[in-house]
Amino acid sequence: MTITTDIVKAIAWLEQHPVVGTAILGSLGYTAISILRAIHRAIKNTSPHIGPTFWSIGRKFRISAVHKYLPSDDPSGYTQVQYSRPDQWQELISIKSNLCNLRHRVCPKNHEDVLAVIISRNGKENQKVINFNR
């Protein structure tokens, strides 16, 4: 019974002090929304970079390009070469799937190459980047 009486007293106090009550309720609402957004961002993982191991149902991932960086005398230090077709990028990377095609790992064939793999893990999400030796 004390919980319900405390709630009734709190509501009565908020009704007696409308300006302070509005400020308190506004700050509680703003705090609750901020906490929920932080949790949603942590779950959604909005980072454009992912690791070489990822999970997807079946082989629904889509690789749109593999960029190979070659050393050069440019100010950036590298020249980029793009491989867009599967027959081209299969010379640079291999994809190993296990656990009934649920877990996939992107592996460069030459472990010293500087690569960036542009991939969509389920074919629908925004494209992510996997960097090797960068």
Image (cartoon, grey):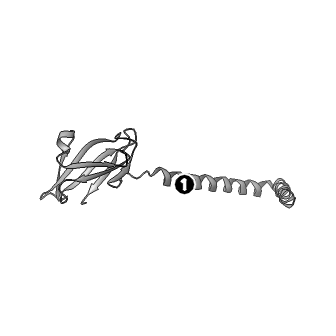
Residue reaching furthest front?
Answer: 100
Residue reaching furthest left?
Answer: 73
Residue drawn 37% across the image and 41% down it: 58
Residue drawn 34% across the image and 49% down it: 98
Please tell me how many numbered marks the rendered image carries.
1
Q: Residues within 10 Å of mark 1 (few under 14, many from 20)?
A: few
Q: Position of residue 82 (x, y in %)?
A: 19, 45
Q: Position of residue 122 (x, y in %)?
A: 38, 41
Viewed as shown, does residue 10 lie left or right of 127?
right
Viewed as shown, does residue 38 lie left or right of 65?
right
Among the 4 quarters of the image, the one containing residue 75:
bottom left
| Depth check, front residue: 94 or 88 | 94
Viewed as shown, does residue 33 lie left or right of 11?
left
Residue drawn 25% across the image and 51% down it: 116
Q: Is residue 102 above or below residue 111?
A: above
Image quadrant holding the N terminus, namely bottom right
Q: Secondary structure at mark 1?
A: helix
* Residue at the spot of label 1: 39
| Depth check, front residue: 16 or 51 | 51
Q: Position of residue 88 (x, y in %)?
A: 17, 42
Residue drawn 72% across the image and 57% down it: 24
Q: Which residue type carries mark 1? A: Ile
Image quadrant holding the C terminus, namely bottom left
